[in-house]
Amino acid sequence: MGETAGVVGAVGVAVRVGKAGVEVTFEQAPAQALPFPDGHFDAVLSTVMLHHLPRIGRAECAREMRRVLKPGGRVLAVDFAEPEGEEKGFLSHFHRHGHVMLREIVGLLTDAGLKLVESGAVGLKNLHFALAKAP
């Protein structure tokens, strides 16, 4: 069985996974400088994280995801799109989170040297995904 590792910005995430009985090694590090060797993983998963990074950081993160992938490895990126046609309610003035358009995620992955396999809506709220493969 291969290694399962995660990069987190907050220790609380690692605690929740540990309680679920999943054996995962966590490293606290920036997504733009993953602490793993080149070609180390079969798959990389980025879930609702890219919108937290500035544009330049997103590109650096995509290049890092590509770097740590084995040949033929896959990246799955899931994030929030900008809500379409959604009226902003009273609470939206107090809570805002970022978004990354699907075309931007696809561009980040392909610019990093990955080949797009599939992309589209997740089917939950305004989440969307891009699945790409390393050559």
Image: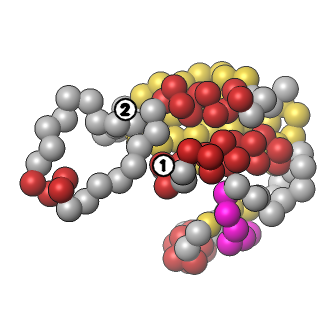
Reply above or below: 78 against 20. Answer: above
Reply above or below: 16 against 36. Answer: below
Of mark 1 and mark 2, the one earlier in the sequence is 1
User: Picture quarter containing residue 24?
Assistant: bottom right
How many marks do you count on the picture? Answer: 2
Q: Residue at x 83, y 44 (%)?
A: 67
x%, y% of residue 79? 47, 43
The residue stretch that appears in magenta: 25-31
Q: Residue at x 57, y 77 (%)?
A: 11
Q: Which amino acid is tagged 1?
A: His
x%, y% of residue 66? 78, 40
Q: Which amino acid is tagged 2?
A: Gly
Q: Residue at x 62, y 38 (%)?
A: 76
Q: Is residue 106 left or right of residue 60?
A: left
Residue 47 visible to the viewer = no
Residue placed most toward the observer, 73 or 116? 116
Residue placed most toward the observer, 112 or 79? 112
Quadrant in which the C terminus is drawn? top right
Q: Secondary structure at mark 1?
A: helix
Q: In this figure, which residue is indicated by the disc labeled 1? A: 51
Residue placed most toward the observer, 113 or 41? 113
Query: Is residue 29 covered in magenta?
Result: yes
Quadrant in which the N terminus is drawn? bottom right
Query: Is residue 11 covered in magenta?
Result: no
Residue sitting at the far left: 90
Depth-wise, is mark 1 or mark 2 nearer the camera?
A: 1
- Quote the CA–CA distance across marks 1 and 2: 19 Å
x%, y% of residue 77? 58, 40
